[in-house]
Image (tube, coloured by chain):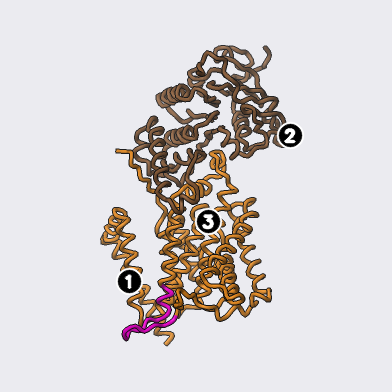
Amino acid sequence: MAIDNMAFSLALILFYALASILLVKTGFWKKVRNSISDNPKKLCLLTACFVLATPLFFFNNPYVLHILTLACIYCVATIGLNIQVGSTGMVNFAQGAFFGIGAYVSALLGGHFGVSFWISLPAGMLAAGFFGLLMGLPTLKTREYHLSLVTIAFAYISFLLVMNFDWTGGPDGIADISKPVLFGFKIGQTVTVGGVTIPGVAFYCYMVLAFLGIALLVAHRLHNSWYGMAWNAIRDDEISSRCYGLSLRKSKLEAFVFGSLFAGAAGALYAHFIGFMSTENMSFQIGLLMVCMVILGGMDNIAGVLVGTLLLIVIPEKLRAFDDYRMLFYGLVLISMLLFRPQGIIPSKPRFFDLKKRV
Amino acid sequence: MNTHNIAAKPLLQTTELSMEFGGLKALNSVDVTVSEGEVVGLIGPNGAGKTTFFNMLTGIYAPSAGAINMSGISLVGLSPTKIANLGVIRTFQTCRLWDDMSILENLLMGTYMRKKPGLFQTLLQYQKVKDDFAEKADEALKVVGEFDTALSSDYDRKVGELSLVDRRRVEISRAILARPRLLLLDEPAAGMDPSETRQLMGDIKKLQSAFVKMGVVLIEHDMTVISGVADKVVILNFGTKIAEGSFVDVKNNPEVIAAYLGGEAHA
């Protein structure tokens, strides 16, 4: 069976590779790209309809919905990470830790105090944001590789603390995390309407999509505002940024806090989705994976980050047969991207300004 | 109200400003005064301490000794951010633009210190952010269009791809958009050909008439620029001020000639 699976997976990869080469060679890809850049609004609408319709087709296949939900949860975390890695140029490997902080705070509040998900999720976000601020303070004195080292240290410290505290469940983690309840309806329970069985995961999927929508809107507005501009300026040249009145301290801390808030929300969504949270899901590897997603997709481009995240969640699932080589695969992706296309699959573009007064 | 006839108020005053790097005295007790509306040319051979002087005025280096006074406020020990917010804006010898950002984004960042929408507006009243950007972009493109209309029509290009001259133009435009009270220009004409240099001189004069109270300090090796626009010339050599006065006065100063052409500096 394993051999068959492997052969199938390899055939699949070959098929996609040939198909993509064909698409580029025939010029079809260029046409698609032009039509995308001509009507961005239509494209957004189309994508939104497509995404909203997708779960409908998989009511009889909860596994696909499960992967889709997981991918969307990761998207929330990676668009937050993009603020730091893509916009500000601070390669933060600790996003997994903030993801974990959000997850643990939300899960513990729900488990120990019976707090509703709708309160424990913001609490998880705030906790992650607070720790983001805390980690941001020492990183202000560092830059580039040294900054990354501080974030790696933070990722390991938080991992070890959660592992060794008693009240976090230690290595056993937390089990039986409750599903969110909205107006008496438990999001995640299976419902049968007129003979059609809707799996619980479909409801959770739609809820996560709603959260992702909000996250996208916030990230888009931050990017296309003075915040995003300041972050880009700091990434490109710190000295000239300071000479034009930017406070590095303020802007960098903002980048850390905003990014961590996203990670905290993603973590809370994850914990209540899976129903189980352990230190394995907040380890350094998770942070590394998220950095890979951002670099693969396209730094400082939100659409790119979504694509990168989706690819790095879906491809390993398709290649279950090669599960042992998963880390190798991430490494390969990262190195080949940095070598051949450092700007990512969808590179960043200049901001669009609505120049009304100009003729 | 404030005409040129009234004796101009001093804008910037340095007293006995010194900078030491280890044992090396990069600047030694330099006194310079810049008045409102005055263009001061800062010249001297390579390594004379001109750029060091700018780095101290903008807070990049903290002076080893001496005082810097900007209309009553001491700049010593302040961060570059605070100094920029007091209205001291500089350009860089090597053009420090934000290379991965577009021309328009660079120019807009010049207006960063002005009133702008905050977090609340960004997240909940996004139209205000758009309007704010549109308004400032309009002004920014007008400013850079004065230099070259190619720059204002092709505003989506990344500045990293531009030629040296265009980069300088974007940089000077960015500085003007910051509405400086004291503008520090570090070799703006370097790399420009004579006609471009003439245009630059015209632009500096235009600036002077547009912002009558703005002081300008100009580092330049091109003497046509200095003689054309500077009201006063300060000459540095080995970190020490050796002469100050009008261009005609200092041109014939034997010490200056010695500094530039070599030889013994005995007057």
Using residue A136 as the reference point, say whether residue A219 is left or right of it.
left
Q: Where does label 3 land, which residue? A: A84
Badge 1 amino acid: Ala
* Residue under disc 3 on the same chain as residue under disc 2: no
Direction right: furthest residue: B23
Image chain in orange:
A
Residue A192 among those drawn in magenta: yes
User: Same subunit under labels 1 and 2?
Assistant: no
Q: Label 1's element?
A: helix
Dot 3 alpha-carbon crowd within 10 angstroms: few under 14, some 14 to 19, many 20 or more: many
Mark 3 vs 1, N-terminal side? 1
Please report the bounds of the magenta region as a residue range: A189-205
Pointer 2 indicates a residue of which chain? B
Q: CA distance from mark 3 to mark 2?
A: 40 Å
Q: Is residue B41 above or below residue A294?
A: above
Tell which subunit mark 3 falls on.
A
Tell me, yes or no, whether the highlighted magenta stretch contains residue B22.
no
**Kind of residue indicated by mark 3:** Gln
Quadrant of image for the N terminus of chain A: bottom left
Q: Residue at point 55% right, 12% down?
A: B248
Q: Position of residue A38 (x, y in %)?
A: 29, 53
The reply to whether residue A127 is in sight is: yes
Q: Secondary structure at mark 3?
A: helix
Residue under label 2, please give it: B23
As drawn, the label of residue A112 is none
Give the residue type that dot 2 points to. Gly
For disc 1, the marked residue is: A53
Report which colour depicts chain B: brown
Q: Is residue A33 above or below residue B10?
A: below
The part of the image, by quadrant, that contains residue B258 is top right
Quadrant where the C terminus of chain A sits is top left
